[in-house]
Amino acid sequence: MTQAKRRNNVMTLFGQIKFPKLLFFGGILLTIGGVAFSLILPLEVRTFVDSFKTHFSMRGVLLIVAMLIGSTVFNMGGGYVLGIAGQRIVSQLRSNVSAHIITLPVPFFDGHRSAEVASHVSSDTEKINDLISSNVSTLVSGLLLTIGSMVILFTISPLLTIIIIGALGLMGLVIAPISKTQSGLYHQTQDQLGKYNADLQQSIAEIRLIKTSDAEPAMIKILKKRIHQLYRTNLRITLLNALIDPIEFTILMGTIFFVFIVGGAMVSRGTITIGTLTSFLIYVFQVLTPIASVGATLTEFRAANGAAQTLTELFDQPGEATTTLSDDVPTTSSAITFDHVNFSYQTGDGPTINDLSLTIAPQKTTAFVGPSGGGKSTILSLIERFYHLDSGTITYAGRNVQDIPLPQWRASISYVSQETSMLFGTIRDNLVFGLTAKPDDDTIKRALQSAAALDFVNDLPAGLDTELAEQAQNLSGGQIQRLMIARAFLRPAPIIILDEATASLDSASEQSIEDAIERLQQTKTIIIVAHRLATVKNANTIFFIEKGAVTGSGTHQSLIATHPLYRQYVEEQLV
């Protein structure tokens, strides 16, 4: 995450949610009630102690006990209600930030590790919860108790109150620079923790690669480096925390000792009574107790502000533009036309697509072949509108695809990527994922049959209800590809895109899918990217892509006759 301009990130973050005002201020009012009992209590203690000269007041004892109970009940109620408010806030934050992340464009994920983003969402929102649930109550009660006690102290003894004010000022001068340093360190800790979690998650997800590459020592070294960075930052935080508490204790104990000396002298001279000194000391403790915890409270606020900074940076990222759904979007297969399209990734490596002009005919099979890195998969990403063009246009049925509402455009495409795209859940859950109208079992089985997947699914003990392991590791690569193709066949979309979708299939399965494609192209536009030319030899049109441009197009036979590099590929693959 990039460093954001310093601001009150917590308050900015609250602007992203419906703040639970009733719960929050209800908790505050209960806390204020507890503070009121605490402020009245020392005055009753003064009366009770001074009454010792004449009698023992049982009424005073009962009144003091009642005030203690009242203070406890109100403070417990305030803490509980604020805790509920904190949970509501965190629930909304997690819901909103999760929804926002899903709407972010693909380039964002190109530049951010998914596990790191997920780590921030889970851990940073928890720090906001800690802030609301615990520290707000502590801060409000401590602030009101301090202000109220100081006012009463000043009416009891201005001289002793000045001593307290001097101690508080000294403490503020000491704590302020330490707290400011802590703020930056806490944000740094959150970033480092996110990177460690991302590396750890990746090492677990790719454990087979690590083991087959004999890379355990290298991976352990990477994780230890992350841990050491986190350790060093936390050491600095620990040092600052270790400084705050002893400094606070020394100042506070020195203040109390000095109050005892001056107050004792005033009692001996008859300036104040012993009851007044007792109540004064109780008020002093009520001032100094929250002040003593100010370091910890400020630390939590700094930690929450650092966490909120990362979350506000996420919210600051613009999501994909969505427009009102349109009634004039073609629902049948139509031509897709690239008109002088140019595109470059944000890596500074130069253009990936160069002045590309071509037409993908409707209800036909169009294939893209060529050397790796030539731009074939990028063309598919541009059709899906994962990225914005540098220049040029892509039209569908003569209409600029940028003018088609994105949800409707994506709904018109069934996309099978070259990466494994299976989620947790059952096979059935994965097949119907994203469909608004859930198909019945017969429809699902027809799609599986077309994708040459029905036999192996039927052989599984739970069939369609088989639970998939992480990354579908309980299935083979070929089985996963067939399920992904079946999922694409289930979508009622006029365009089907297959990006290296048959690379892991045997010849029989590939032939079955080719037969299904031939039937589907009667109503759908089929777009295929493949390195295996046997997959595309029956395509109606083949575009040969090199360095982001078309260097040849035609049928399989015509390209053999006119395109030397295509002919070389055919000879090498013995197609």
Image (spheres, grey):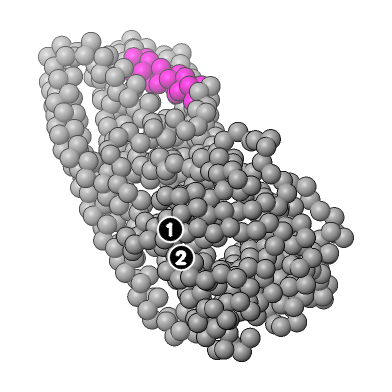
Give the structural element (helix, strand or loop) at label 2: strand
Query: At which x and y percent is residue 25?
Result: 48, 21
Residues packed near mark 1 inside 10 Å, few (<14), some (14 to 19) or many (20 plus): some
Q: Is residue 537 magenta?
A: no
Q: Which residue is mark 2?
A: 549
Q: Quadrant of the C terminus?
A: bottom right
Q: Nearer the viewer, residue 6 or 40?
A: 6
Residue sitting nearer the eye, 211 or 368 = 368
Whether residue 97 is situated above or below residue 417 in the rendered picture: above
Q: Which residue appears at 63% of the width and 65% of the height?
A: 366
Q: Are marks 1 and 2 in contact (CB under 8 Å)?
A: yes
Which sits in the foreground, 6 or 411? 411
Give the mark, 1 or 2, whose residue is nearer the N terminus: 1
Classify 75 as above or below 204. Answer: above
Secondary structure under badge 1?
Answer: strand
Name the residue tied to disc 1: 355
Q: Amino acid at mark 1?
A: Asp
In this picture, which residue range is highlighted in magenta?
24-44
